[in-house]
Image (cartoon, helix red, strand yellow):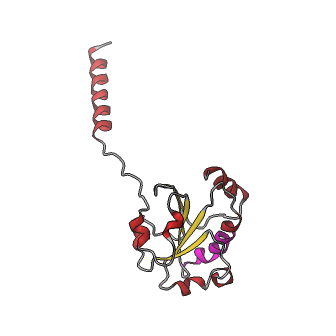
Amino acid sequence: MTKKALMIAVFGSVCLLAYFGLREKPPAPPRVTDTALSRLNGFDREKLKGRHYLLHFWAKWCEPCAVEIPHLVEFAKQVKTTKPLYVLAVSLDNTLEEAMEILPGGGKDLPPNFLLALDPEHQVAEALGSYQYPETYLVGPDGGILEKWIGAQPWKKPEVMQYFSSKIQ
């Protein structure tokens, strides 16, 4: 190896070492804490402890949300997992009554695994970095966020049902 090639190799190695050694660690993924959930109004937090669940942010004033929410309710009715999969639908509206106006049947016939909550000041949504509604998170039993979906999702597709059936065990 020539002296020039050796110097280039050493310089390249030092640059790579500096780049990978000095980089900041990526931030830890956000967690959904009990404290965050306590800021939400209208549901029993105990139902979610130690379980996987979907955390879904939506609002009546959001057109894609209004189209999607009936499909999410139907998904909650039909999803089959080893352990019950809860859907925590967090409305960003000012009142729960306002939010329920766009739910199927005015929200009177929701499945037991579909929980409603209210975050009118967007505190929890903003803490998780949500701002493009609807947004949905798959939250693990320890509160860690496993997946995030932005925008309306195809809840009626069989592949979606299969995904959750295999993921939640």
Please tell me whether residue 130 is drawn above or below residue 96 in the rendered image.
Answer: above
Residue 158 image point, x, y percent:
73, 58
Residue 6 higher or lower than 55, as above or below: above
Q: Nearer the viewer, residue 117 or 155?
A: 117
Q: Residue pushed farthest top?
A: 1
Residue 66 point in image, percent of width and height:
61, 78
Q: Give, as a single range, the part of the protein colored magenta.
A: 62-74
In this image, 44 relative to 3: left or right? right
- Which quadrant, please, contains the N terminus? top left
Name the residue at 44% across, 69% down: 37
Classify residue 71 by image quadrant: bottom right
Magenta span includes 73 = yes
Check if residue 19 falls in the magenta segment: no
For the stretch drawn in magenta, the main secondary structure is helix
From the viewer's perspective, is 164 left or right of 131?
right
Q: Is residue 77 above or below residue 138?
A: below
Residue drawn at (66%, 74%) of the image: 70
Foreground: 40 or 147? Answer: 40
Asked if residue 167 lies left or right of residue 127, the reply is right
Res. 126 image quadrant: bottom left
Name the spot of residue 86 as percent of width and height, x first.
Answer: 59, 65
Answer above or below: position of 66 versus 2. below
